[in-house]
Image: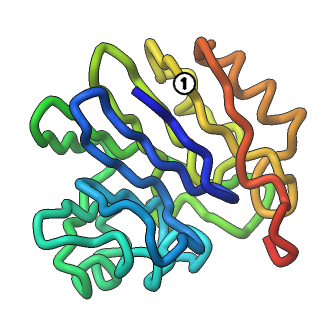
Amino acid sequence: MEIIWLSHAAFKIKTNSGKVIYLDPYQLPKDAEKADIIISSHSHGDHFDKRSIKTILKDSTSLLGPVSISNDLNKFNGKGLKLGEVFEVDDIKIQLVPSYTIKKATHPKSNEWAGTIIETEGKRVYHAGDTERIPEMKDLKDITVALMPCGGKFTMDFEESCSATLDFKPKIVVPMHNLYISHV
């Protein structure tokens, strides 16, 4: 499995079997590789970039996100998942988990936005979405790679992100959403 940071909170995962998964696609080039699966954590433009989705979408692509953004997903024949629900395609399991802020009003729990756990090839990748350290992180198990926000403006900062990873002890941590974009 190959995990490629694209920008901001956007990642591409390429499995050993050749499946291409995008997480929170944002400002992708026009020649970006087509997706088998696209997952958006919430509907903010830096996580649900409609131009990027159009670029990587093909007829067979599974576009997923939380039920709370179903109106946006439906424009692309996407599917809303409930938090905790598991979606399976081939040898890939996708589960959406809570992602919200407590101290900041930017991403309230009531929006039911999502982090994502992708399980394939004996590995578990956790994309936290836009979040702070939340109690549900203690329930995360056997995470191989954690993609964690650390920008501080709309999400947890670097120090809080480090503390959050102590709650579930992933093998590898990759920082993201760390203010490389002026407005986020």
Q: Is residue 7 left or right of residue 42?
A: right
Q: Which residue, given by chain and number where applicable, does mark 1 sit on? A: 145
Q: Is residue 146 left or right of residue 1?
A: right
On the image, the x and y values in percent for residue 164 come to 72, 28
Q: Which quarter of the image is occupied by the N terminus?
A: top left
On the image, the x and y values in percent for residue 30 come to 47, 78
Name the residue rendered at 61%, 46% in the picture.
5
Name the residue rendered at 48%, 47% in the picture.
115
Q: Quadrant of residue 29?
A: bottom right
Q: Is residue 72 left or right of residue 24?
A: left
Give the residue at the far front of this rendering: 31
28 vs 100, nearest the viewer: 28
The amino acid marked with disc number 1 is: Val
- Local SS, label 1: strand
128 vs 68, nearest the viewer: 128
| Above or below, comparing residue 168 to residue 15 in the picture | above
On the image, the x and y values in percent for residue 104 come to 78, 61
| Above or below, comparing residue 127 to residue 152 in the picture | above
On the image, the x and y values in percent for residue 130 come to 63, 55
Q: Quadrant of residue 147?
A: top right
